[in-house]
Image (spheres, helix red, strand yellow):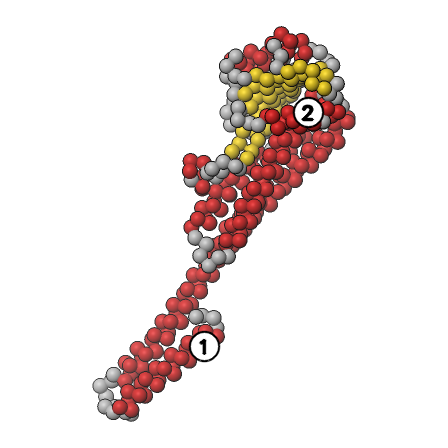
Amino acid sequence: MSAPVRSRVWRHGRVEEVDLSQADLDARVRDPDCVVWVDLADPDPATLAHLGHEIGMSSASIEDALAPLERPKVSRHPDGIAFVAYATDLGGPALDGDVTHGRLRMRRISGFVTPTALVTVRPADFPIDGVIERWDSDPELLEHGVGALLYGLLDALVDGHFATIQQLDDAIEGIEDALFDDTPGHTLVRDLYGIRKDLVRLRRVVLPMREVVNALLRHRTTGDIELDAWYDDLYDHVLRAAEWTESLRDMVTTVFETNLSLQDRRLNVVMKQLAGWAAIIAVPTAITGWFGQNVPYLGFGKPIGVWMSVIAIVLSSSALYLIFRRRDWL
C-alpha cells in the first residue's frame, strides 16, 4: 500500500494490539468484544477502496472520503455512518504571502463508523497523535465502544476550532487597539481584511458541525446511553464555537464601520483646520487690498495708514484664531 496505515485494537478499554496485519484486522473487526481503529494518511483511491471494502465501507462512503470540497456532513449507509469534518489552525504564514488571503489552514478528516470499528482518512500533516493521547488518557470511556473513539476525535477537532477562534479574537483585539491611533496606516486595513476572510472560511466548517454532532448522536451504531452525556457536552461546545464565530464576524463588521467613521472624522478635522487657516490668511489679503486702493482714505499716503493696516491685520487674525481654537477647529 502506498499510504501509511495505522491500526489499534482495544479490548475492555485497554490497548491489545497495534498495527495489525490485514488478516488480523479483518478478524478483529468482526469480533464484538473489540474496538478497532484504522487510520489512513493521504491514501490513494485504490488503497482506500481495497481496505474500505475489506472493513465494510460502502462505495458511497469511500467516494465521500475522496471527493474534493466536501462540506462537513454525516451520511448513513447500510453498514455504518460516514462523516466529514475539518481541523483548523491559524499558525501558518499568510497564504501566497499575501495577508489579505488569510492564514487559516483547514484539514479534512473523513471517517466511517461501524459497530466495532472507526476508520479515519486524513492528511499526513494532521497531528493524529494528540487524538490517540486523548483516547489513552481515559480507558474507562473506551469501554463504551466505538462511540468513545468517535467522541475523542470530534472533541479534538472542536478544541482546535476553539483555539483558532481564540487566535482570531486576539488578532481583532490587537486591531482595535491600533484603530484609534492617529495614523493607523494601510497595514491595519489589510490585516483586518485577512481576518475577515479567515472568519468566512472558518464559519463554513464550524457552523455545520452542529448538524454533524447532532446526526451522529441520533444515528450512532451503538445505543450506549452513558455516552449521551459526553455527546451532549460536545454539542454544547459546538454551539459555543458557532456563536463565538458569529460574534467575531459581527465584531469585524463593526471594526470596518468604525474605521470608516474614524476616517471621515479625521477628514472633517483636516477640512476644518484648512478652512480655519484659509479664513485667517484671507484677513491680511482683504485688509491689504483695502489699503491698496487708488482713492484717498483716512491715513492715505501717511505712516498712520501703515500702522492702521498692521493693527487691523493682527487684531482680526488673532480674533479669528481664538474663535476657531475655542471651537476646536485648530
> Which residue is under mark 2?
136
> Considering only vertical position in the picture, is 238 above or below 69?
below
Measuring 31% from the left and 88% from the top, which residue is drawn there?
Answer: 307
Q: Amino acid at mark 1?
A: Ile
Q: Residue at x 59, y 38 (%)?
A: 163
Q: What is the x, y in percent for residue 31?
A: 71, 11
Mark 2 element type? helix
Tell me if I can see residue 222 in this picture: no
10 Å neighbourhood of mark 1: few (<14), some, or many (≥20)?
Answer: some
Q: Which mark is residue 113?
A: none
Residue 191, horizontal then vertical, whole percent: 47, 45
Type of residue at label 2? Asp
Pointer 2 local density, CA inside 10 Å: few below 14, some 14–19, many at least 20: some
Residue 62 percent coordinates (x, y): 56, 17
Q: Which mark is residue 323?
A: 1
How far across and down, in percent of the image, does residue 21 sit? Answer: 61, 10
Front position in the image: 60 or 172:
172
